[in-house]
Image: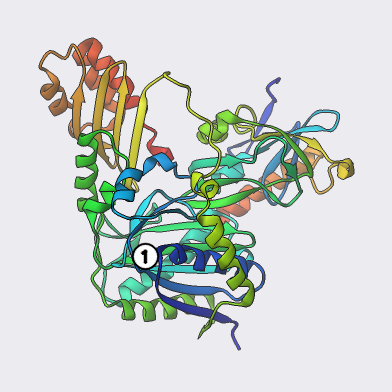
Amino acid sequence: MERSKLVVVAGFPLALDRRYHAETHMWVLLTGPGRVRIGMDPLGIETSGTLAQLSLVPAGTELIAGRPFGQLEAAKFVGPLISPVSGAVLAVNDEVAADAGLAERDPYGAGWLIDASLGAAAGELPGLLADPAEISAWFAAKIADYRFRGVIAQ
Amino acid sequence: MAESLRVIDFGCSPPLRSQTLWHAIGYGVSAGAPATLSFTRPAAPYVCLGYHSGTDEVDHDYCRANELPVLRRMVGGGPVYLDADQLLFQICVPARAVPAARRQALRMLLEPAVTSFRELAVTAALDDDLEICVGDRKVCGHGAGQIEQAVVVCGNLIERFDHERATRVLALADPAQRDQTLALMRRFVAATPVAPEAFQAAMISAYAAALGLSAAAGELTGTERTAVADLDERFTSGTWLAGADRPAPPDGVGPHVRQVKVRAGVWTLSATCDGAQVAASVVRGVVDQVRLRASGLNGSSHQAERALTGVPLQSVAQVLAGFGEPGRRLAAAFAAAEPGRL
């Protein structure tokens, strides 16, 4: 897959060729008709702490927006990876499941999590940020907020 | 009037229930039950795997021979040995009540435990790795997780600690690594011999104050009782014990590595690469003890061990480069360590 161009916002890389779920920091990249790739953006990763382990549901599993498709462990805290879309898992990234650090090192590329087909009701992927200007503004505001609250370093 | 912090003291519980009772509270709080502080003490010793622990991290033959059940929890961390000398506590709150950033949530839910130790004149502190320590010794294990819409952090008051058994239950094929692990356990994990009743009372006050809630004794809801029965079944199933699917490492490629974390920044490593074998303990990024085996060292293994002791991990390859081709293989074995993932 072609590597996406990144911009840097307040020290964090941001890919503008995809959509974002504002609360979960999941990105969704359209890869074909009714098909998407899903991963976690660097802010979601940074605020989790050093990723220790990551587990993903197997291919074929139904995805429901707002429900977990895997678990992520960082700082001995196991929390859900929340799906931003409904559909079905087509493939999981075994490399990131074997080495969670890949999601830190290359969050927009080799650190992707799952490929999925979209459910019939997915339509225009409601609830996701799609406009690059809107995405940039959201990302910058999140960084400022996390820094203000001491969640991430200045 | 402040909302309530439900307090449940389960007393002594069989190993399985010492896990399933508080996991059931997670489902209860997720469904609307109040924030809950619970306590239990295992009636018998057992081993508990973290959510992502591999079953191969535990010596199952030893556990069977010593009638130690092996269970798996939903929260993080590695395999731990639990027994009646440990008072287990759990704080469970709605996920919306804690910051979304995990480290902040953990800090918020661990600080009252630190306050409780300090109330009993134990000079505990929450360090930068979010471990509760006295000096450089961990005095309280912890794990955390999200169960549906509830966040739970569990920990333990270690009244006495069986370092030997805590090490023995681990699957460690390399005797040198076992010795090093035990030495680090003794050095970096400490018991806190305070009165457990006083600790419980301090915990109740500290968590109620921190959460702005009014503590009140309570009991499980009907939904939670049902969840206990379901969890009893799930936690004893082979599927659950096997854990999450994990991709198998490529067979026969690269170094074989076994790492054990004793506390944050303190770990042991056993690794082999092309016939070169390393067993080492690492404290705060510095090689503490090391045992090296490699064909071609020709009697200089002790010299290499001395040269490595006290060396920062990032300088290991440079030091071993002075030992020729065997040194390069040993450096490759060392390089397989991933301290950040522990």
Q: Nearer the viewer, residue B25 or B204?
A: B25
Residue found 24% across the figure and 65% down from its top? B160
Per the image, the residue denoted by label 1 is B156
**In the displayed structure, does residue B213 sit left or right of residue B332?**
right
Q: x, y percentage for residue A154?
A: 52, 47
Classify residue A45 by image quadrant.
Answer: top right
Residue A3, above or below B262: above
Element type where label 1 sits in the image: strand
Q: Nearer the viewer, residue B123 or B147?
A: B147
**Amino acid type indicated by mark 1:** Asn
Q: x, y percentage for residue B263?
A: 32, 49
**In the displayed structure, does residue B115 sit left or right of residue B300?**
right
Residue found 29% across the figure and 46% down from its top? B62
**Dot 1: within a 10 Å radius of its alpha carbon, few (fewer than 14), some, or many (20 or more) residues?**
many
Q: How many labels, in total?
A: 1
Q: Chain of mark 1?
A: B
Q: Nearer the viewer, residue B23 or B195?
A: B23
Query: Is residue B29 visible from the viewing direction of this image?
Result: yes
Q: x, y percentage for residue A46?
A: 55, 44
Screen quadrant of the C terminus of chain B: top left
What kind of colouring is applied to the model shown? rainbow
Residue B151, above or below B257: below
Classify residue B277 by image quadrant.
Answer: top left
Residue A142, above or below A12: below
Residue A44, above or below B275: below
Residue found 56% across the figure and 38% down from its top? B245
Q: x, y percentage for residue B194?
A: 25, 74
**In the displayed structure, does residue B184 sit left or right of residue B211?**
left
